[in-house]
Amino acid sequence: MRSSQEIREELRTWILAKAKRLEPETLTGTTALFEERHLRSVHLPELLLLIERLTGAPVDVENLQAGDFRDLDTIMLRFCGEGRPR
Amino acid sequence: MTPADLGALQRAGLTWFPSGQVALRGPLLRLAEACDGAFARLAAAFDADEERHPASLPADRLLRADYLRSFPHQATFPMRMVPEEANIEAFLDGRVLDGDGHVALAELSPVSDLLTPAACYHLFSAHEGEDLVGPLHLTTRNTCFRQEAEYVPLRRLWSFSMREIVCVGSKAEVEGFRQRVRACVDAFLQLIDLPIEWLTATDPFFQPQRNPKHLLQRLQPVKKEATYGGDLAIGSMNSHYDHFGVNFQISRDGEPAHSCCAAFGIERWLFAITDRFGTDPARWPALEDAAVQAAAMTMGARV
């Protein structure tokens, strides 16, 4: 089972692979991934599958709420049981 | 809608066609024009340039906006018979119209246009490739066509009139517009005493559960509807982000432009106003005066 740090790193790597204009040093935990158009709707299905694979738990699409995928910190908090880093 | 309600609307100038269309005359036509006049006054507060566009637009334009893949179930297509004499003669030699009212068409020309599904698509198409030096404010009105599962007089129509006010510009310019136009509309609604709720909504995607655009709209809401009576959207505010800027190569400051529109379905306003104030024109609010006042209150406007 992956640690939350490992999950965060894998998500970061995936985001940077998709977000062509996003540099590693500018991707923080609070970078607005969709609002700032780094990711687009076409990326969502793959992101859902990735989260399910990394966490080993299904994502209940029907219960997703506005803002659940806003940024990396929110994704970790919502799906990976991680608190916001201080 | 009860038969009594429909009867009152008919006496005020409504003719209802079960195909999902209406004809207007008399008081209701004047009310429709007053509604559009009021929205045009709101648009003038933003110095929005008026544009007029045709009834249809090329399908490749709408494919670029992803309309055809997202809303194919609502699309309506203008068709023509192949304009060769022999083909037209074949049509005339046939039944022309069958007993069910269906036209017995001869060979059809290829279909390459759609009847306008939303007024603002024309604007993005018309401004394709522009490199903006400032925010672009536009307004337009068109007859729009959307196939629906059922039709209800003034509430859900196959063809209806839509007035839109659009801003294309930088992210900050568009967000500023969104806030100001929302304030303007709120002030207008308050002045005419028409109660609404702004509700978060998603667009009516085909098979939404299979469309990631629908999921993204749930996760990152882009649409607020001015909802009358709990279930009738009489207007909407739509944030497009850079969707049209990217797909129509409209740029601002070297980046794909952002855009936002305020849309008003005029026939639905007729329903809301007659539902609230009745069908006696003497009881209807002075819409254009209220729009001027609302713009002045919120914009210090030049109208």
Image (tube, coloured by chain):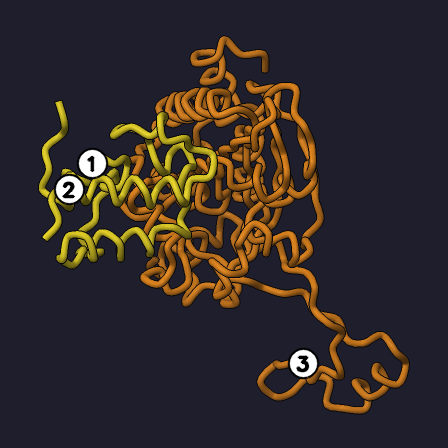
Chain colours: A yellow, B orange
Q: Can you identify the residue that label 3 sits on?
A: B103
Around disc 1, counting alpha carbons within 10 Å, would you say few (fewer than 14), some (14 to 19), or many (20 or more)? Answer: many
**Label placed on residue A74:** 1
> Residues under labels 2 and 3: Cα distance?
57 Å
> Label 2 amino acid?
Arg
Q: Is residue B228 visible?
A: no
Q: Is residue A32 above or below residue A58?
A: above
Q: Nearer the viewer, residue B9 or A81?
A: A81
> Label 3 amino acid?
Val
Q: Secondary structure at mark 1?
A: helix
Q: Residue at x 67, y 80 (%)?
A: B103
Q: Chain of mark 2?
A: A
* Residue A61 in picture, x, y percent from top left: 22, 56
Q: Chain of mark 3?
A: B
> Label 1 amino acid?
Thr
Look at discs 1 and 3 and give the one toward the viewer: 1
* Residue B118 in picture, x, y percent from top left: 55, 48
Q: Secondary structure at mark 3?
A: loop
How many labels, in total?
3
Around disc 2, counting alpha carbons within 10 Å, would you say few (fewer than 14), some (14 to 19), or many (20 or more)? Answer: some
Q: Quadrant of residue B211?
A: bottom left
The answer to whether marks 2 and 1 sit on the same chain is yes
Q: Residue at x 42, y 43 (%)?
A: B279
Q: Nearer the viewer, residue B109 or B264?
A: B109
The answer to whether marks 2 and 3 sit on the same chain is no
Q: Can you identify the residue that label 2 sits on?
A: A78
Q: Chain of mark 1?
A: A
Q: Residue at x 9, y 53 (%)?
A: A1
* Residue B37 in picture, x, y percent from top left: 58, 30
The answer to whether the residues at label 2 and label 1 have Cβ atoms under 8 Å apart is yes
Around disc 3, counting alpha carbons within 10 Å, would you say few (fewer than 14), some (14 to 19), or many (20 or more)? Answer: few
